[in-house]
Image (cartoon, grey):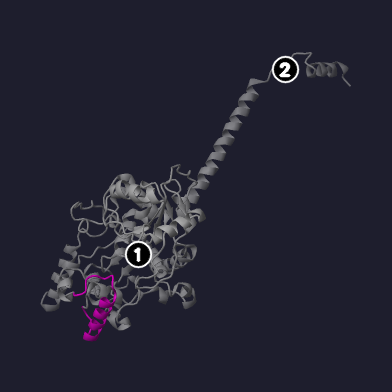
């Protein structure tokens, strides 16, 4: 043993000697290694996040809770079909945010013509909805127990529920409804949600509406799985067009249109229209309504329009709709022009659709998914689904959406059936649709006529990269 060196080591340990200075070279190397390690870890996390956002772009980030004093609970009862309810829910998210309310998960319409008993959580991922908007508003699944007695008392006194005014500016909610109803009673129930918010407003409000629609409203896993499966089946065979063919019994009855129907069918549609109390307009002239471009296109008219617009005969066409009025017989001319005509019921075995079969809103959700993924979207009537899908496809990068000029089409089709030759008909149809492919445009604003101005949800320009 080297006693001299051992003594020196003991001395240094006991503080009796001077400690050796660290080598600056090794210190620099250690710092550099640490820096490299930190950068490497950061890059790994960045790649992981980027991949997560790529494949799970709808997954909510862990955003911080918004800290605010809630003025009370807002209960909303959505009305109408799936897409009418969808837009109304998104509007109510914005309303709740501006009123500093706590939103209760919306109730869906179970009493309309379709009699669909689906709840919010049957169609949308409720936890995703709550988490995605946690930095904007608090959302709860139900009124807490300590407030339920107040809710009962308000219901008995008829102070709980009200239908908000249609096409209202956000100031109507912040300046009137919030102080007079919400703050006073702590619970408020909106009986209707359709078109209760103006098309135009503060840009922050518009972006919140978009956030609710395009990020927070995510379909449940079963619906997404079926929708994705249909898209894959279609995509494996090439490009496809989604045809939103609204030649359905309820839509024909509602609009008062009977083009292509027999006398018996026209009477059946009229009887249905008069039997639905919330359809206010009863006496409707089908001929004049059609000439104004306000009727759903018939399958025959649709075939002529698609052919004139240059849609190839071999194109896969997926019909996103319920039962076509008149069944296969009514579809005969369209199928003759486009033999690759399919519906989800033909693409999937019955057992796969069985869980959704008697739920019209869930079936509509599947069609909505397929419509977003199509190469071309062609609606035959400007209803709620047509407008929401059009706006969503704009949001996804201005995907091709043909917006039929129905008034021009009806005029041209009638002339073609008389004496207009095909070349002139084709040229007229293409001219009428020169700028109707879902391209970037500005909304037309008409403050005094909100029903006639361009609809926010068909062109949410505040949320688009124009």
Q: Nearer the viewer, residue 314 or 142?
A: 142
In the shown orientation, is residue 83 left or right of residue 118?
A: left
Q: Residues within 10 Å of mark 2 (few under 14, many from 20)?
A: few
**Quadrant the N terminus occupies:** top right
Q: Quadrant of residue 20?
A: top right
Residue 327 against residue 30 in the figure, above or below: below
Verify CB contact (< 8 Å) between mark 1 and mark 2.
no
The mark closer to the camera, 1 or 2, is 1
Q: Look at the image and say whether residue 260 sits in the magenta stretch.
A: yes
Where disc 2 sits, the SS reads: loop
Name the residue beneath numbered marker 1. 79
Q: Look at the image and say whether residue 152 sits in the magenta stretch.
A: no
Q: Residue at x 43, y 58 (%)?
A: 153
Pinpoint residue 297: horizontal percent, then vertical percent.
24, 72
Of labels 1 and 2, earlier in sequence is 2
Determine the residue located farthest toward the left in the rendered image: 419
Q: Quadrant of residue 219?
A: bottom left
Q: Nearer the viewer, residue 424 or 293?
A: 293
Name the residue beneath numbered marker 2. 20
Pinpoint residue 175: horizontal percent, then vertical percent.
30, 46
Asked if residue 37 shows in the view, the reply is yes
Say the numbered circle drawn on residue 12. none
Distance, label 1 to label 2, CA atoms, is 81 Å
Q: Residue at x 30, y 84 (%)?
A: 329
Residue range highlighted in magenta? 259-283
Asked if residue 248 shows in the view, the reply is no
Pinpoint residue 58: horizontal percent, then vertical percent.
45, 54
Determine the residue located farthest toward the bottom in the rendered image: 264
Q: Nearer the viewer, residue 240 or 190?
A: 190
């Amino acid at each position: 043993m080297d006693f001299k060196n051992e003594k020196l080591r003991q001395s240094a340990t006991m503080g009796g000697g001077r400690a050796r200075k660290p080598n600056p070279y090794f210190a620099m190397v250690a710092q550099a290694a640490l820096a490299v390690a930190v950068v490497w870890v950061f890059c790994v996390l960045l790649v992981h996040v980027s991949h997560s956002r790529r494949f799970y772009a709808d997954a909510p980030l862990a955003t911080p809770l918004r800290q605010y004093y809630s003025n009370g609970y807002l209960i909303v009862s959505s009305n109408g079909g799936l897409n009418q309810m969808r837009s109304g829910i998104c509007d109510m998210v914005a309303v709740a945010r501006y009123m500093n309310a706590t939103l209760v998960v919306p109730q869906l319409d179970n009493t309309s013509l379709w009699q669909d008993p689906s709840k919010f959580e049957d169609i949308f991922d409720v936890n995703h909805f709550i988490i995605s908007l946690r930095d904007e508003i608090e959302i709860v699944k139900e009124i807490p127990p300590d407030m339920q007695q107040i809710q009962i008392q308000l219901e008995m006194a008829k102070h709980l529920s009200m239908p908000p005014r249609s096409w209202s500016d956000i100031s109507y909610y912040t300046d009137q409804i919030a102080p007079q109803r919400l703050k006073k009673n702590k619970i408020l129930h909106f009986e209707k949600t359709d078109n209760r918010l103006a098309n135009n407003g503060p840009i922050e409000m518009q972006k919140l509406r978009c956030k609710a629609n395009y990020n927070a409203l995510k379909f449940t896993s079963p619906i997404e799985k079926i929708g994705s499966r249909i898209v894959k089946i279609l995509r494996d065979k090439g490009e496809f067009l989604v045809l939103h063919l609204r030649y359905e019994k309820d839509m024909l009855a509602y609009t008062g249109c009977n083009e292509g129907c027999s006398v018996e069918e026209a009477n059946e549609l009229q009887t249905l229209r008069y039997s639905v109390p919330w359809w206010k307009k009863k006496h409707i002239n089908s001929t004049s309504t059609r000439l104004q471009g306000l009727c759903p296109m018939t399958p025959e008219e649709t075939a002529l329009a698609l052919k004139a617009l240059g849609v190839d005969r071999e194109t896969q066409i997926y019909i996103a709709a319920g039962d076509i009025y008149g069944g296969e017989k009514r579809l005969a001319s369209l199928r003759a022009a486009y033999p690759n005509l399919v519906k989800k019921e033909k693409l999937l075995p019955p057992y796969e659709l069985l869980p959704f079969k008697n739920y019209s809103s869930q079936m509509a959700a599947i069609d909505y998914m397929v419509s977003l993924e199509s190469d071309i979207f062609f609606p035959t009537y400007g209803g709620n689904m047509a407008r929401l899908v059009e706006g969503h496809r704009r949001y996804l990068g201005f995907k091709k959406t043909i917006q039929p000029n129905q008034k021009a089409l009806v005029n041209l089709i009638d002339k073609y059936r008389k004496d207009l030759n095909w070349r002139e008909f084709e040229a007229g149809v293409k001219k009428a649709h020169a700028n109707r492919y879902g391209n970037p445009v500005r909304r037309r604003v008409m403050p005094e006529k909100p029903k006639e101005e361009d609809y926010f949800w068909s062109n949410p320009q505040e949320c688009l990269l124009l």
